[in-house]
Image (cartoon, grey):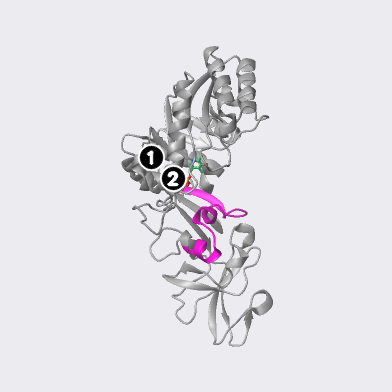
């Protein structure tokens, strides 16, 4: 463990790489013969892209996916040699650095493809390109109206060996709603896009479509590879159906900064929104909205501390909040660890924050920042 020599941080996200490995194995089982590309965009959903990538590859993942070229180059610089795809590019993206680092580039337009070709010629090396096709998400990906032109240019670039054509892929709009008819509609459009490319003489080495939700609920859409993100981190994309045995990898925790008595009738925190109706003991937790504890959660969440749920009382401040220990304070003392969310039995699950806040757990695990120090345990590192 790399934490031994450093003092315990006040606020910490602790990421369990054994949980990442466990989740990758579950996804690989669902994928059958298809390979697993682990999505580590947004710094591995705020879990640490490099550490997660290494743990996932060691557990059997074949490839990595990110949004931008700099994210991909950073993985290469960390010594990762597995295929890496990046898919949110623009005409002025630094494609030369991607070509030099052997990063697979997804293109969404003729302009993108032209820029990639220019970079390949400049570097003097073949660029690896995949087609992101828009099958109905209407976000990035080649629009149907531009597809023929993109194929035409791609065929020329492949013929002159400026480009190696790797894959066709697309992204689903409603995968988390397995009964949505849009999923089959997107599948049909995807198959059509593949057939059109083949008619243009472009044979992809592989095709892929499924995110976490589709990887777990629609094995028929696994094609050659699945592209899970959130499930790798242990959060079910369809929690109302199942947790699939996934283990949340992130624990958000903080060390109690102070324990004190508060007399009946006293108000706690700004605005005195909570007033003690009895003498009680409270604990001060040194994490606030500057660290990723949303102020709108105030009075609506618990921490796991001293073997029990302890409710937040009063407003969440920039860097601290208070919990009520009540009469059964379990001897909680300064320095004890409070879990804000995590996978431990009894501790709040990120889904609880999501339900209270009216958001999704993806956003919850992306929240910790500021003074929250990220550490990793487990894994083959
Ligand atoms: C984010 C993303 C994924 C992973 O989605 P999850 O819902 O986290 O599994 C897969 N493919 C693309 C193109 C993405 O942008």
**In the image, 239: left or right of 317?**
left
* Residue to which mark 2 is pinned: 183
| Residue at 48% over, 73% down | 310
Is 1 placed above or below 121 here? Answer: below
Asked if residue 221 can be seen in this view, the reply is yes
Which residues are drawn in magenta?
A: 352-376
Of labels 2 and 1, the one closer to you: 2
Q: Nearer the viewer, residue 281 or 323?
A: 323
Asked if residue 74 can be seen in this view, the reply is no
| Residue at 55% over, 76% down | 282
Mark earlier in primary sequence (2, 1)? 2
Is 212 placed above or below 129 here? Answer: below
Task: Where is residue 24? Give x, y as percent.
Answer: 38, 43
* Residue to which mark 1 is pinned: 221
**In the image, 98: left or right of 230?**
right
Q: Is mark 1 within 8 Å of ligand 1?
A: no
In what element is the residue under mark 2? Answer: helix
């Amino acid at each position: 463990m790399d934490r031994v020599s450093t003092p315990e941080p006040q606020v910490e996200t602790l990421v369990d790489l054994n949980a990442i490995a466990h989740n990758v194995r579950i996804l690989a089982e669902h994928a059958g013969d298809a390979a697993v590309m682990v999505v580590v965009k947004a710094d591995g959903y705020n879990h640490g892209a490099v550490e997660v990538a290494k743990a996932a590859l060691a557990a059997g993942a074949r490839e990595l996916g990110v949004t931008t070229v700099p994210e991909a180059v950073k993985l290469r610089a960390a010594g990762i040699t597995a295929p890496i795809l990046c898919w949110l590019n623009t005409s002025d993206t630094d494609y030369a650095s991607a070509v030099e680092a052997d990063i697979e580039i997804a293109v969404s337009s003729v302009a993108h493809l032209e820029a990639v070709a220019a970079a390949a010629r400049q570097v003097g090396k073949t660029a690896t390109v995949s087609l992101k096709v828009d099958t109905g998400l209407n976000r990035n990906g080649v629009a149907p109206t531009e597809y023929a032109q993109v194929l035409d240019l791609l065929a020329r670039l492949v013929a002159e060996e400026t480009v190696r054509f790797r894959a066709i892929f697309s992204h689903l709009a409603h995968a988390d709603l397995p009964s949505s008819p849009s999923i089959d509609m997107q599948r049909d459009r995807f198959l059509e896009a593949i057939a059109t490319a083949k008619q243009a003489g472009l044979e992809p080495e592989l095709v892929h479509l499924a995110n976490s939700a589709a990887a777990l609920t629609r094995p028929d859409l696994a094609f050659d590879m699945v592209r899970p993100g959130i499930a790798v981190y242990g959060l079910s994309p369809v929690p109302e159906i199942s947790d699939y045995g996934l283990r949340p990898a992130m624990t958000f925790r903080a060390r109690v900064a102070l324990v004190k008595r508060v007399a009946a009738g006293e108000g706690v925190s700004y605005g005195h929104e909570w007033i003690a109706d009895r003498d009680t003991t409270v604990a001060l937790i040194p994490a606030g909205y500057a660290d990723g504890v949303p102020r709108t959660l105030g009075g609506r969440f618990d921490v796991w501390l001293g073997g029990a749920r302890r409710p937040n009382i009063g407003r969440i401040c920039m860097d601290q909040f208070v919990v009520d220990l009540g009469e059964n304070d379990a001897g909680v003392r300064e320095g004890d660890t409070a879990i804000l969310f995590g996978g431990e039995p009894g501790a709040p699950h990120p889904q609880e924050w999501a339900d209270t806040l009216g958001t999704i757990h993806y956003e919850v695990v992306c929240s910790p920042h500021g003074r929250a120090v990220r550490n990793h345990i487990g894994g083959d590192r």
